[in-house]
Image (cartoon, helix red, strand yellow):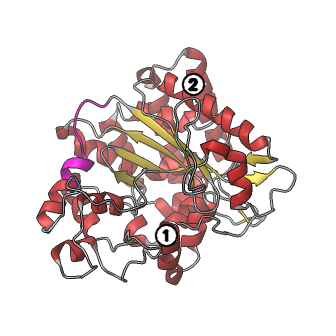
Amino acid sequence: MTILRDTPINGPEFRPLRERVEAEAYVASVCFKHGPPRLIGVELEWTVHYVDDPQRQLTAEVLRKALGDHAPRTLRADSPQISLPGGSPLTAEPGGQVEISAQPEDSLTDLYATVTQDTEYLTGLLAADGLALGTSAIDPYRTPQRILGTPRYKAMEKAFAPLGTDGVTMMCSTAGFQVCVDAGEQQDHAARWTAVHVLGPPLSALFANSPQVLGRRTGWVSNRLRTVLGTDPVRTYPSEITGDPATNWARRVLETPLLCVRRDDDCWDAPPAVTFSDWVTGRADLGRVPTVEDLEYHISTLFPPVRAHGYLEVRYIDAQEGDRWLAPAALLVALLSKVDEVIDICMPVANRWLTAARDGLRDPELARTAARIAELGMGALGVTGLPPHLEQLVISDIERRLQDGRSQG
């Protein structure tokens, strides 16, 4: 989750935006920072359950008590919001899911150590109050129920409601795994943007981990991905693969309707179908001129499989059980050292997002593609710098998933 202020702040540093071209130029320059790809970060979400009864609904009070002074201010307004021992901030999602956002590292080994430390600490905090982290990327037992009452989440739920139940399910019942990588040098932006997108369907299929909803298997291997894609297509569908991703991303940001508008009161509802472009050009009067921070906040309300926000947020992989997140993270890092080969292998399945969510590796073409990119990535794991025992852990995990997929097929 991108951490931004939940209250508007007035001051000269928050520059007003009055022209669409100015807003687009800002998005294009800030969302695609260029430089040698070096850093990697991860964000891990989990649903939270009672150990003795995973079907029992969680309450804000119980979660607040369990997290103590680590609780985010969306859960406890006066919390000191102390980071976890490894330095990861802790946040909470609308349905009580918890998330740690590890600080970016230039070493995947160091990142793994930090996340392991913070995950174990968080597990201990929850266990002391009879709670446990979920093991699936969607709540397999409970109906969606929002327990956080922030203006943002109330506005989101209201905006999604006319589109069906996927919105509240995404907000309150899903848990994703996010890998954050540098956009790379400017001349490489288009290729890296293409690569992370075309990898989406085969990696989603390979690491699918949400087959069960409300106590039964639905036939979809990733109910989380299906739910996200169905929430609000204008803000959740994959972005265009293009030779000029910065310009196209800026255009998409400006043309996406507002999901919420920060105000001094408790109502952040956005007028229907009003885009950020409408606001910045004055075609819609929202009572004030938008600022740069409003634009940043608006970007945080887009949820495509890949989001550009100064770096590339790869958001299409299901949350994994325990430390199994290392396999998709390491495989993605390795594959981004083989961009041209990745594009050649994956382009034929680049648009098969729903097939990946429904069938996963049961689909023959996705299974073949996943096997090819797994072989390519496992052969390039040396670029991750992982020590031999962690590299072998990654290889064993990937091979096991491929074998399971073959069995299902």
Q: Please state the horizontal and vertical placement of residue 226, each as a whole percent of the image.
A: 55, 64
- Is-magenta flag for residue 402? no
Q: Given the image, on which type of amino acid does mark 1 rest?
A: Pro
Number of numbered callouts drawn: 2
Q: Nearer the viewer, mark 1 or mark 2?
A: 1
177 is higher (above) or lower (below) than 399 = below
Tell me the residue at 64%/46% (across/down): 405
Q: Given the image, on which type of amino acid does mark 2 rest?
A: Ala
Disc 1 and disc 2 in contact, CB within 8 angstroms: no
Query: Is residue 406 visible in this depiction of the protein?
Result: no
Which range of residues does the magenta coloring cover?
27-37
Q: Which mark is residue 151?
A: 1
Is residue 250 toward the left or the right of residue 319 in the image?
A: left
Q: Secondary structure at mark 1?
A: helix
The residue labelled by disc 2 is 113
Inter-mark Cα distance, 1 to 2: 36 Å
* Pick the front one: 112 or 223: 112
* Pick the front one: 360 or 43: 43
Q: Please state the horizontal and vertical placement of residue 305, each as a whole percent of the image.
A: 43, 56
180 is higher (above) or lower (below) than 28 = above
